[in-house]
Image (spheres, grey):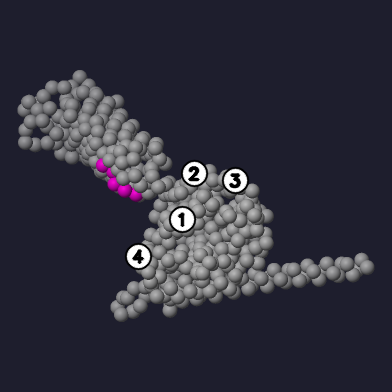
């Protein structure tokens, strides 16, 4: 009897391991099929709105249907949008697995990936195709296989799970923006949004990255829960998405304060290059990532509550914060302007570094700064080098967008010289004024956290206490090209 029991256990464990191995192998083969199909040369890069994009959409919708996903509007997986709406040029593909809890089933976990890419170009009568295997056939393949796994484990789900293949991401996140703008689902019912974007280079990146764990309570703890992570998978987390030059479909959801996770293996692949082909993809790594996403989605589905922190990445802020702090540096030139006479002094080096504070009030802001300045100026009695503490106080005209835009500013400044020399001798403050006033003006261009601009300072009080032989006073004229970082 005891021997028979051990034999039964052995057989059970053997078949369990065999089944798990077979399932993993089948999923890897499925992942390959999806990526090779979507990134084939014949798909001509799946440009948004193209004939090939529509073929890709049909392929994805067929997969959703075979998996038994519910059509989002009862008769179609397609959500049409955009300027070609009438003939179906742009379309998101949306399928749903409903939860089983009588209350939580009306709340949603949304996972998505975009299926469009950047198309092709003709060069020297040759067609060059940007196949987009990693960007983002890998994300779509993962989305389909996660849907397959959850359709087999749907009894475990309490909240409903929405699967979205986004269109027109490459031309400005248009598909995801439309879902949020049109409120295809009640936004307050979407408790989490996950985007799988470029997940095919796991070995090269040595990890899969989850950015956004700071957008919900206990985010890092949940994502890194060892019980959810398959053996062999390394996970890195970031509180928020940092790369201001790259955006994914999380953005419109994060802007309305829905917690988001951007899942990626980074930019190791030939990003937006013709070499982004299916044979370079790490399918074993994708299988591990799909396994983790499957477990994570079930965890999100059964959690008692998913609480947003209310915090988002700077790149996801729809408007600027009321208060902003930054650092700024600049390099440029300074010269002596003479109040009388035909000639001014020659330009010399100037540089500055300091901190910037800004209080935003919509299209207007006030910006006090505290700066160290080093000014050089040519003078008949010897070169003058002075170090200043300068405090500009500017009125700013701006756009309200937190991610990018122009800023114009003008205002007074106060400057005090705390050290200087003329030639090799210390500067003589019996001849020169230590405290100076002027007008500060300029413009800047902001992209994410980076600010670049031009600043002109025009001194309106005299640098010297007495006029020269031509009855002229000296005043500094300073110009900077600057770069700064806003926290």
Question: Is residue 59 shown left or right of residue 454?
Answer: right
Q: Secondary structure at mark 1?
A: loop
User: Alpha-carbon distance for marks 4 and 1?
Assistant: 18 Å
User: Alpha-carbon distance for marks 3 and 2?
Assistant: 13 Å
Q: Position of residue 293 (x, y in %)?
A: 59, 60
User: Alpha-carbon distance for marks 2 and 1?
Assistant: 22 Å
User: Alpha-carbon distance for marks 3 and 4?
Assistant: 41 Å
Q: Which mark is residue 183?
A: 1
Quickly name the residue at label 2: 311
**In front: mark 3 or mark 4?**
4
Task: Work out whether mark 3 precedes mark 2 in sequence or the reverse, and give the earlier one.
Answer: 3
Task: Work out whether mark 3 precedes mark 4 in sequence or the reverse, and give the earlier one.
Answer: 4
Q: Secondary structure at mark 4?
A: loop
Q: Is residue 108 visible?
A: yes
Q: Residue at x 74, y 68 (%)?
A: 16
Q: Are marks 4 and 1 in contact (CB under 8 Å)?
A: no
Which secondary structure type mostly characterizes the magenta part of the structure?
Answer: strand
Q: Position of residue 328 (x, y in %)?
A: 34, 40
**In front: mark 4 or mark 2?**
4
* First to last magenta residue range: 404-408
**In front: mark 2 or mark 1?**
1
Quadrant assignment for the N terminus = bottom right
Is residue 83 found inside the magenta-colored segment of the image? no
Q: Secondary structure at mark 3?
A: loop
Task: Work out whether mark 1 precedes mark 3 in sequence or the reverse, and give the earlier one.
Answer: 1
Q: Are marks 3 and 4 in contact (CB under 8 Å)?
A: no
Quickly name the residue at label 4: 83
């Amino acid at each position: 009897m005891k021997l028979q029991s051990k034999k039964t256990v052995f057989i059970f464990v053997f078949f369990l391991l065999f089944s798990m191995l077979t399932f993993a192998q089948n999923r890897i083969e499925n992942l390959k099929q999806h990526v090779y199909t979507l990134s084939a040369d014949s798909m001509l890069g799946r440009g948004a709105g193209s004939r090939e994009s529509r073929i890709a959409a049909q392929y994805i919708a067929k997969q959703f249907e075979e998996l038994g996903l519910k059509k989002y509007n009862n008769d179609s997986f397609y959500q049409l949008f955009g300027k070609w709406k009438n003939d179906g040029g742009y379309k998101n593909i949306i399928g749903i697995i409903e939860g089983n809890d009588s209350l939580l089933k009306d709340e949603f976990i949304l996972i998505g990936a975009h299926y469009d890419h950047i198309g092709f170009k003709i060069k020297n009568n040759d067609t060059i195709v940007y196949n987009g295997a990693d960007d983002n056939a890998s994300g779509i393949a993962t989305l389909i296989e996660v849907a397959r796994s959850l359709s087999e484990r749907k009894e475990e789900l309490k909240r409903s799970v929405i699967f979205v293949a986004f269109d027109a991401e490459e031309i400005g996140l248009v598909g995801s923006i439309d879902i949020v703008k049109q409120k295809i689902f009640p936004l307050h019912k979407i408790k989490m949004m996950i985007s799988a974007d470029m997940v095919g280079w796991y070995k090269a990146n040595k990890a899969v990255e989850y950015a956004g764990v700071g957008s919900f309570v206990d985010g890092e703890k949940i994502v890194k829960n060892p019980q959810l992570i398959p053996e062999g998978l390394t996970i890195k987390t970031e509180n928020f998405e940092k790369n201001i030059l790259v955006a994914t479909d999380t953005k419109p959801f994060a802007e309305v304060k829905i917690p988001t996770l951007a899942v990626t293996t980074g930019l190791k692949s030939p990003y937006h290059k013709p070499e982004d082909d299916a044979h370079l993809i790490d399918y074993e790594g994708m299988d591990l990532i799909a396994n983790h996403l499957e477990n994570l989605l079930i965890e999100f589905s059964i959690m008692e509550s998913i609480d947003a922190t209310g915090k988002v990445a700077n790149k996801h802020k729809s408007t600027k914060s009321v208060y902003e702090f930054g650092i700024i540096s600049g390099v440029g030139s300074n010269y002596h302007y003479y109040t009388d006479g035909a000639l001014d002094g020659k330009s010399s080096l100037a540089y500055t570094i300091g901190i910037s504070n800004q209080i935003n009030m919509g299209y207007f802001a006030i910006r006090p700064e505290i700066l160290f300045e080093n000014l050089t100026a040519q003078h008949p009695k010897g070169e003058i080098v002075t170090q200043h503490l300068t405090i500009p106080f500017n009125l700013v005209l701006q756009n309200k967008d937190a991610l990018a835009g122009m800023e114009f500013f003008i205002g007074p400044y106060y400057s005090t010289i705390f050290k200087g020399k003329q030639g090799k001798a210390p500067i003589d403050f019996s001849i020169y004024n230590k405290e100076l006033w002027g007008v500060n003006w300029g413009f800047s261009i902001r992209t994410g956290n980076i600010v670049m601009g031009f600043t002109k300072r025009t001194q309106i009080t005299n640098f010297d206490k007495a006029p020269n032989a031509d009855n002229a006073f000296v005043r500094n004229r300073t110009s900077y090209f600057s770069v700064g970082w806003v926290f």
